[in-house]
Image (cartoon, rainbow, N blue to C red):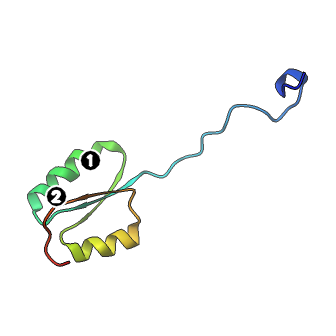
Amino acid sequence: SSGGAANGVSGVGPARMEPTMPHTILVVDDSPTELKLVTKALAGTGSRVVTATDGEEALAKAAAERPDLMILDVVLPRK
């Protein structure tokens, strides 16, 4: 037999669950109302939410934070 556990080989078992970092979401909108609405909607997801209010700030935060997801307004001031 070539099975690991079947022939008494130790060290084979269930995979350990490593703690995972929360996903980072960058929300970009120049409307404070829309920004607050989307941020509140994401609050219960366990994700870390980062916000920006214009294109220039969004580019800087995207470079610094390396978000897993970006939610963007279609028309933004500054870049």
Numbered circle sitting on residue 79: none
Q: Amino acid at mark 2?
A: Leu
Up the image or down, 12 lies above or below 67; here it is above
Left or right placement of residue 55 versus residue 14 in this view: left
Q: How many numbered marks appear?
A: 2
**Residue beneath the point at 51% across and 48% down:** 20
Left or right placement of residue 66 versus residue 27 in this view: right
Q: Earlier in the sequence, mark 1 or mark 2?
A: 2
Horizontal and vertical percent position of residue 41: 21, 45
Rendered-image quadrant of the N terminus: top right
Horizontal and vertical percent position of residue 31: 10, 63
User: Distance from label 1 to label 2 (Cα)?
Assistant: 11 Å
Horizontal and vertical percent position of residue 23: 41, 52
**Residue beneath the point at 83% across and 25% down:** 5
Numbered circle sitting on residue 42: 1
Disc 1 secondary structure class: helix
Name the residue that disc number 2 marks.
Answer: 35
**Residue beneath the point at 85% across and 32% down:** 10
Up the image or down, 67 lies above or below 40; here it is below
Q: Amino acid at mark 1?
A: Leu
